[in-house]
Image: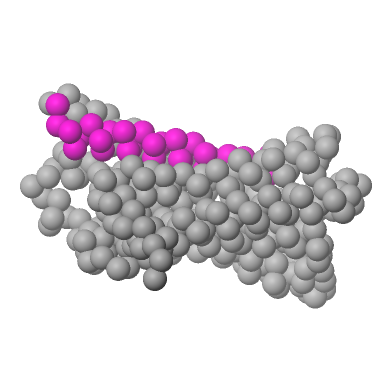
Amino acid sequence: MNVSSANATVVLQYRDSFTKAVIKNLIIVGLWISVNYINAGLIHTFCKHQIFYMNPRYVLFIHLVVNDMVQMSLTVILFIISYTVYQLNVPMCCILILLALSTTENTPLNLACMAVECYIAICVPLRHVQICTVNRTLMLIGSIWTTSIFSALADLFITLATEPRDFFYSKIFCQTQTVFPNPVIIKKREITYAVFLVLVWITIFFTYFNILFTAQTASKDAKKARNTIFLHGFQVLLCMTTYVAPQLTIVLLRNNYVDTVFYVHLIIQVLPRAFSPIIYGVRDTTFRKYLKRYLLCKMSPQ
């Protein structure tokens, strides 16, 4: 029995009761609405004020917010499909999974770029304006998407070359292991994730310790940047849980699969996406000031 058929068999064996399924879906959708409501406020605040969209730091941040909104929306759609439609046409599943994989890989890369921007602002302040421009930031975002999309498309090309034509006319339980079942893809993804994580962690540690040394000069901005880099590292740590999901799934086949996968979904998909609004929407003084104005205007009677 291969991994795809094994996963399908396990899901059939541990199907939730109607009440339990409704409760789980309400929790997932409720959290999705809550996080996206906050993120929508951040995006609105960003778009309404030039101080944000002319600043590379906030451009990178809002890209992270939009990317995580898309990623979380895709995972919620896939979660609901697993309880309602159950099986999906392979082409449609491919599109959803490819987008989910691309946005998942974008997050740690974006965090690494934000850490570098903090490093330049604190450690090389005289060159910050020349190095960190909005145009270069947009090019950097384009590079992030190009890297993640090519990585995801490689899975599709391998599948097109190795799977029979009938596979693409069939319906499957829509998850990464079933739509891209070739062992070469799994190995390639493990190597890709390992390379990404090594590069991101090197960047996080380099920027953190350099800012840490600068912070010893009692600079308030340096100390704040040091704390921000530390939180970026925590976000990356949360993102790493996504990269071990396939191995975790194999372990869960021996336990109550559906319940455990539900809790893992909350930790892997929801928690990291809830952190971005907290780090910049709440911690950042400038963003907090304008966001508070937006929320007060929304609550005040017309």
Q: What is the image's colouring? A: one colour
In this image, 42 relative to 289: left or right? right
Look at the image and say whether residue 232 sits in the magenta stretch. Answer: yes
Number of disc labels: 0
The location of residue 78, given as percent across then percent down, is: 69, 60
Q: Is residue 177 magenta?
A: no
Q: Which residues are magenta?
A: 218-247
Residue 224, located in which quarter of the rendered image? Answer: top left
- Nearer to us in this view, 177 or 158: 177
Confirm whether residue 62 shows in the render: no
- Which residue occupies 61% across, 62% down? 74
Relative to 70, is 177 above or below?
Answer: above
Q: Position of residue 212 (x, y in %)?
A: 24, 28
Residue most extreme to the right: 13
107 sits to left or right of 12? left
* Residue 168 appears anywhere in the view: yes
